[in-house]
Amino acid sequence: MSAADVAAAAQRFAGVLPPSPLQRNERLSQRHDLDVWLKREDLNAVRSYKSRGAYNLISTLPAEQRERGVVCASAGNHGQGVAFACASLGVQARVYLPRTTPRQKRDRVAALGGRHVRIVVEGETYDEAAAAAREHAASTGTTLIPAFDDPRTIAGQGTVVKEAVEQLGRAPDAVVVPVGGGGLLAGTLTWLREHHPGVPVIGAEPAGAASMALALERGGPTPLEHVDPFVDGAAVRLVGRHTYAVAAAAPPRLVAVPEGRICVEMLDLYQSDGIISEPAGALSSAALGPELGLAPGATVVCILSGGNNDVSRYAEIVERALVFQGRKHYFLVEFPQEPGALRRFLDDVLGQDDDITLFEYVKRNNRETGPALVGIELGSPDNLEPMLKRMDAAPHRIERVPPDSPLFTFLV
């Protein structure tokens, strides 16, 4: 695979997939002392870059394979890309989605594909859905459309950076790419290595699913023992054979971005920039920071890979962001079973800008005391230490629930 394959892919869907905008972001530029540009793949017809690779692959299939139909597995965005391509090209598709796929993405697959797509919900993770899709392809003779591990898919995804450089009118000083299975990363590397080999590519992986970093460390695709499914568009247990080979040829710099930091950036994109991003879409801009070592004023292109976010997830996003910022904390408090106990706790412990966001008795009984789970949102992270000191001096028995506690997983 070469940059010529990327250029050919761009020609195939010219007029079908209009270029996505490249926009300078003032908030990120000022915050990081950089010249930050967002490649807005969330504004594509399927609200992600996945339509590029899917259309490129399906459009190159022989007529016989098109007639038999295609099958794919997806966390949501690839399924939408396949649905769009199949509706455009008149091909029948079967799309396997894991149960964790947000309802919004399921509905979009159905809307984009119409009568050309049948949705099958299978497995708890993307990898389980992918296994079901492979089994269906093997038993029926339909063509499997990989989400990332196929040279034709990779070539299609490489058109994102090709467009960005053409829109910018020059090569940027760095490109930050979200990384799941590695298709977008591999396509970006393929095109830049031939046209602008001096431009560094930084791959941003979710900290709970850093599968490309593990592959490069182990010398080949290696399954992660545990995957945090929150960043569903990039929560991949095992990177592709083809994507790994491209990355391993000259390994890019990879950074692991905490899920809480991604949530903070999602909220900033929404509240400050009016951009609805899914978790994977905010990966690249969330990765920006002094640890990247970029020179002040450097021009950086961040690929905002998708905007298919279910509105019902925002409560969890806000919660994760507050915890990451150090503003949300949970405690087990033993209260005396008498009138005014909660009021005394508020007077003794809470600061002026702090608030109780959760109060729930863990166990109700007739004893003189009863334990309660208390969630507290601080006006500022700096309020934590003074509050902990007031707790030590209070008559209540108080135990903090740390973020790494198994109990915490039931709260966030």
Image: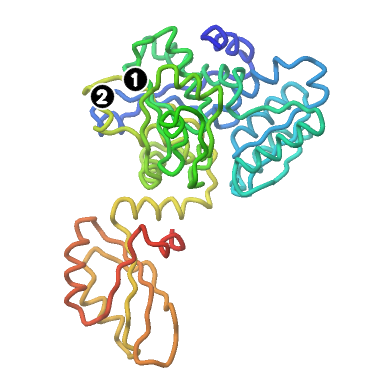
Determine crowd level at label 1: few under 14, some 14-19, many 20+ residues with C-alpha closer than 10 A.
Answer: some
Report whether 245 appears left or right of 352.
Answer: right
- Tell me what residue is drawn at x 55 percent, y 22 percent: 242
Report whether 312 appears left or right of 372.
Answer: right
- Tell me what residue is drawn at x 61 percent, y 32 percent: 78
State the mark number for residue 72: none
Secondary structure beneath label 2: loop
Q: Amino acid at mark 1?
A: Ala
**Front in this rendered view, residue 304 or 392:** 392
**Front in this rendered view, residue 131 or 341:** 131
Residue 172: where, in percent of width, then height? Answer: 34, 16
Residue at the far front: name it: 218
State the mark number for residue 294: 2
- When asked about the image quadrant of residue 178, the answer is top left
Q: Quadrant of the N terminus?
A: top right
Q: Quadrant of the C terminus?
A: bottom left
| Marks 2 and 1 close (CB-CB < 8 Å) | yes
Q: Is residue 331 above or below residue 254?
A: below
- Tell me what residue is drawn at x 64 percent, y 28 percent: 146
- Tell me what residue is drawn at x 66 percent, y 41 percent: 129
Residue beneath disc 1: 174
Sequence-wise first label, 2 or 1: 1
Residue 48: where, in percent of width, then height? Answer: 55, 30
Residue 133: where, in percent of width, then height? Answer: 71, 36
Q: Amino acid at mark 2?
A: Leu
Report whether 258 appears left or right of 42.
Answer: left
Residue 292: where, in percent of width, then height? Answer: 28, 29
Report whether 128 appears left or right of 173.
Answer: right
| Colour scheme of the picture | rainbow
- When asked about the image quadrant of residue 259, the answer is top left
Marks 2 and 1, how far apart at CA: 8 Å
Secondary structure beneath label 1: strand
